Image (spheres, helix red, strand yellow):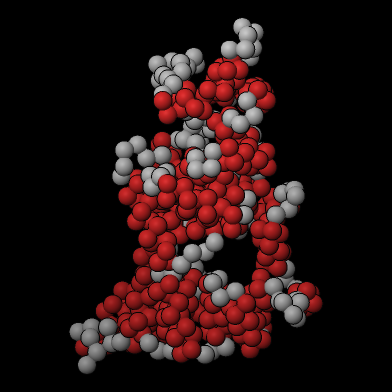
Amino acid sequence: MLQSPCSKNSGVFRLKYLSSGRNRTRPLLLITAAVMMFLYPFAVLAQEGDDSPDPIAIFNEAQDHHEKGELDEAIRLYKKAIELAPEFPEAEFQLGNAWLSLKKYDEAEAAFRRAVEHREDWTLAMSALGSLLVQKGNYEEAEPLLVRSLELEPLNFPAWAGITDLRLRTGAPEQTLRKLLTDVTALTAKAKPTSAIWAARGALEHRLGDAKAATESVGRALAIDGRNETAIALGAEIALSGNDPERADGFIERLKAAEGDSAAVKMLRARSYILRNNADEAMAVLESISPATRDSEELLAKLRAATNDDPAALEKELDPASPDPAILGRLCGLYRRSDPQKALEYCRRAAEAEPDNIAHAIGFGSALIQAKRYGDAAGLFKKLVPHAPENATARANLASALFYSKQYAEAKNEFRWLLDRQPDLTAAYYFIGVCHDQLGEFMDAMANYQEFLRRADPEKNKEDIDRLTLRLPALERQIKRTGGKKR
């Protein structure tokens, strides 16, 4: 999300020597010795005659309009001040902020560049330019600006937010991100941390897998500035990553109110529809993004592949030189029952093409189960689950693989994990009962069998009900004979 580096929603930053703090709309000049050299040329201009326009007065008037949200008038006056005093970095900086508020990113970049040119080591302008360049994808030029800003001013919050964004966008290694999180966390403990620095902390926590801490940081950021677009978008991202589309929708609506129905808002909304298994609505939203972005095109292609039920047609779409992982993954799923060996090949290729996508690895493991390679599947899922311990699909497949490979003690624990999170998962009671039965834990087996029978659907679960009808009399005799335990 492109956002002003200033703490106010309007992007206004009152330069200290241009405001007395006593009256926000009519600032008094507090001219110190440190800024006399800068103001001297303007003072000369003002002394040329009583009617000579004063660039400082015009600049202050522009800031008044800026603070009120009257951006067009503020921009007109900033430009007028700059015309009268061409080397006026403060006016250029505020002009850049006004353009940023209007989402005019090229104009904002040009203004920030001029501010830096007029005052080379002004950290505020450098960090603003660097942050904007990061968000526009110009990482190579952004980094030295942000690094230099922090060298000159170690407590430059906008620069820290910018460098965090840069590291996240460029895929910095975990060690680098953890060191950065330590530094940013220390900044949030300082007096009056900004909304942007809390959002930066939340983004790092989210990337490093601490959803709870990230959620708290987003809350802190929004408590300071309820319209911080970066924090709002991060809140939506955290909710979507946690498979909570309802909560995500609240953030998405807030983001829409702040920046309109942008491509970023539509991407988040499409992902929310996907979590609700509403592929048609998701595709409609993605198709409405104009001009299309790389992310929207990729997601749309994946959705189309995921909803295509014709494997022959999908195979024709595959590019031999660079096959689409989404199509490979869909073919993996389509062939899983009809041709397990073919499914295995497509699943393997999908996992190799997109190794960071756990869904492909899960698909490969599911295909192993369909091919009755239960031991191999169990081994694969035992490696996968530690990387995604809350992924119910991976845990369900692990439970099945362990069960069918007769690793009943471990399978029992996995099915119990599933039941703890999905109490209505009727079939799990049957499998847990079988595990106890095979382990000689007859009383526990009976309890789970009876719970299964109480919940089971007579038609859907007919085969398992029939098996238990045959098994229960013998199990009752074993319990009476052994006291419920295998001898």
Residue at 54% in and 72% down: 356
Q: Nearer the viewer, residue 430 or 116?
A: 116
Q: Which of 102 and 381 is in front in this view?
A: 102
Identify the image quadrant of residue 452.
Answer: bottom left
Q: Is residue 292 above or below residue 19?
A: below
Residue 22 as seen in the image, left or right of residue 359:
left
Spot occupied by residue 46 in the image (x, y as percentages of width and height): 59, 14
Evaluate whether residue 217 shows in this view.
Answer: no
Q: Nearer the viewer, residue 326 or 179?
A: 179
Residue at 50% in and 58% down: 168
Among all residues in the image, which is located at the extreme top?
50
Q: Is residue 249 above or below residue 424?
A: above
Spot occupied by residue 71 in the image (x, y as percentages of width and height): 62, 26
Spot occupied by residue 328 in the image (x, y as percentages of width and height): 67, 76
Position of the C terminus by quadrant: bottom left
Spot occupied by residue 28 in the image (x, y as percentages of width and height): 46, 16
Residue at 51% in and 28% down: 38
Q: Nearer the viewer, residue 131 or 18?
A: 18
Evaluate whether residue 127 shows in this view.
Answer: yes
